[in-house]
């Protein structure tokens, strides 16, 4: 099922499958969200829970038992139910069940809320631990945005620009996208910018830590832009399908990182996972501002 929320500035459509964004349009009908061409990348904006990116051999352990989980967890592949909807907001919900317990041994309720305020879409994730034991998880977003956003411009006319100067580090990955322990400084042009070009992603995602928490996708030659704010996230990733001229870029706020190469991670020991005690609720927020 598809659900639409709308105000005077934005019209947003959400797919109940994975609670994935399907469309973000400005008032004049301009589409900002990548539309999922299967010849390039059929995703649009997958939600990530309860693990970010890859597990070695798709496996992890917890409390002496071994479990299997695919890339980016499972929330992107399940149907969520609408719990509450107004003209300008919608909350979708998913509860743990026998299927999730087979791959993730924690009882939870997951909610995601999309809410419009002016030309900004706020995204709130909520995880409620309805069990008695501490649960461990990662969470994040994976939205893709069209590039270019205007006729007459090219992919290379755009950049990703942080709001404030920073000295980020690029997280070191192996060729198959596991941690290799070799993080390195990642210089930004003028201390803030990453100019876009397609071969930027030939080695897969650029994942940065120690950045400013607001980044804008824009071109100095155009008026339309997308600004993503992620105050509650430690890591930001940028990606499009490697080694092709894909006309989009993903801006991905992550709470944690994938597993180490060759290591079957223990969820109880992986330091960057969120730990949530029984009966407690975790919330975070990120936002997308549509400019132009």
Image (tube, rainbow, N blue to C red):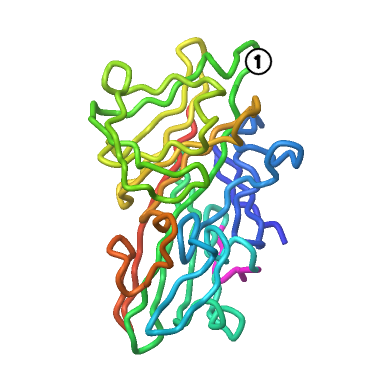
Asked which quadrant contains residue 198, the reply is top right
Q: Quadrant of the N terminus?
A: bottom right
**Where residue 282 sits in the image (x, y, percent)?**
34, 68
Residue at position x 52%, y 20% in the image: 197
Decide which of 257, 126 is in the foreground and name it. Answer: 257
Give the farthest residue toward the right.
39
The percent coordinates of residue 78 (x first, y second) are 64, 68
Quarter assignment of residue 275: bottom left
Give the magenta-colored segment's residue range.
79-86
Provide the residue designation for mark 1: 151
Magenta part mainly helix, strand or loop?
strand
Q: Secondary structure at mark 1?
A: loop
Closer-to-camera residue (45/84): 45
Residue at the (42%, 43%) spot, across then down: 173
Question: As drawn, is 158 to the left or to the right of 34?
Answer: left
Q: In the image, what residue occupies the spot 44% across and 81% down? A: 106
Rendering quarter of residue 202? top right
Is residue 106 left or right of 272 when viewed as pictured? right
Residue 41 lies in the magenta stretch: no
């Amino acid at each position: 099922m598809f659900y639409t929320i709308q105000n005077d500035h934005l019209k947003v459509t959400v797919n109940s499958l994975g609670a994935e964004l399907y469309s973000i349009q400005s008032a004049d009908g301009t589409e900002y969200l990548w539309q999922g061409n299967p010849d390039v990348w059929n995703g649009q904006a997958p939600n990530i829970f309860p693990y970010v990116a890859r597990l070695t051999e798709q496996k992890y352990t917890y409390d002496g038992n071994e479990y299997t989980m695919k890339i980016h967890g499972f929330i992107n592949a399940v149907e969520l139910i609408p719990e509450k909807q107004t003209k300008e907001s919608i909350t979708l919900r998913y509860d743990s069940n026998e299927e999730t317990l087979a791959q993730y041994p924690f009882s939870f309720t997951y909610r995601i809320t999309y809410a419009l305020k002016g030309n900004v879409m706020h995204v709130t994730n909520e995880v409620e631990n309805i069990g008695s034991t501490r649960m461990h998880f990662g969470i994040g977003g994976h939205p893709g945005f069209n590039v270019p956003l205007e006729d007459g411009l090219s992919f290379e006319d755009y950049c990703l620009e942080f709001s404030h100067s920073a000295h980020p580090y690029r997280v070191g990955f192996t060729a198959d996208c596991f941690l290799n322990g070799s993080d390195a400084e990642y210089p930004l042009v003028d201390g803030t910018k990453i100019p876009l070009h397609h071969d930027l992603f030939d080695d897969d995602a650029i994942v940065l830590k120690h950045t400013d928490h607001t980044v804008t996708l824009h071109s100095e030659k155009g008026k339309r832009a997308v600004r993503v704010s992620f105050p509650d996230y430690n890591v930001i990733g940028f990606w499009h399908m490697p080694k092709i001229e894909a006309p989009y870029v993903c801006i991905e706020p992550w709470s944690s990182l994938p597993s180490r190469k060759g290591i079957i991670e223990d969820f109880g020991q992986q330091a960057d996972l969120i730990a949530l005690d029984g009966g407690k609720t975790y919330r975070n927020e990120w936002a997308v501002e549509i400019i132009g």
